[in-house]
Image (cartoon, grey):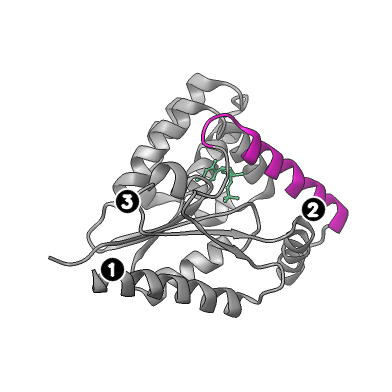
Amino acid sequence: MEKSLTIAIDGPAASGKGTLARRIADYYHLGHLDTGLTYRAVAHMMLQKGWPLDDDAHAIEAARQVDLGNLDKHALSAHAVADAASKVAVIPEVRRILVDKQRTFAAQPGGAVLDGRDIGTVVCPEAPVKLYVTASAEVRAARRLRDIEGRGGHAGLAEILDDIRRRDERDMGRSDSPLKPAADAHLLDTSEMSIEAAFRAARAIIDGVLAGQNAS
Ligand code: DC
């Protein structure tokens, strides 16, 4: 039977976990799901319909409609959507519905890479590889600013930093599935690392786990 490999990647906003997850999925030929997009899809629908973000019943309805095969990355990348996503993500029933869909994705033949906030702790607690990718809030804000400017946009560093801190507080402080490293996660602080160096470090961790599995 083909071996299955699940890789769980968690970390705060703008930590670089998404870029890393994509590189890892390509390298190991695995499917990839950015689970943040599922929360963003709920938020996007709420904003479009003009529903208040704390309207649980409508948020639950929106969560049921999320289709993993039809996540419009471009529409979901807006800043307002990200902020709203971290608000609807506190609703336990929304999480339960999305986590079910994420687990179905994770169970695909061969395995998958999932990135988010609660993958190692809640969605895939049995994943043999768990990475917790982090960087200081200042470094994350500077990276986000470079990103925005690289796309021809403008923003203020102080404003971005505030925003990142607010989102960290909400994501780490909620009572249901808060962002935190799983007990058996490998910590990867990328504050002083290039994406290339972070990718090399992640590969060393993953290859180590695979070697251990093959030996046993
Ligand atoms: O990773 P992101 O910026 O696209 O995530 C947007 C929001 O979605 C994030 O602030 C909190 C929520 N989220 C979550 O609660 N659990 C996940 N597994 C992924 C994202």
Magenta-drawn stretch, dominant element (helix, strand or loop): helix
The numbered dot on residue 105 is 3
Local SS, label 2: helix
**Disc 1 residue lies near ligand 1 with CB under 8 A:** no
x then y, percent, for residue 123: 40, 44
Q: What element carries label 1?
A: helix
Horizontal side of residue 197 vs 106, given as left or right = right
In this figure, which residue is indicated by the disc labeled 2? Answer: 160
- The residue sitting at 25% across, 62% down in the picture is 4
Identify which amino acid the numbered label 1 is placed on: Gln
Report the label total: 3
First in sequence, mark 3 or 2: give its number. 3
Task: Determine the image quadrant of residue 136.
Answer: bottom right
The 10 Å Cα crowd at callout 3, few under 14, some 14 to 19, many 20 or more, is some
Residue 174 drawn in magenta: yes
Of 49 and 114, the residue lying toward us = 114
Magenta region: 156-177
Picture quarter with the C terminus: bottom left
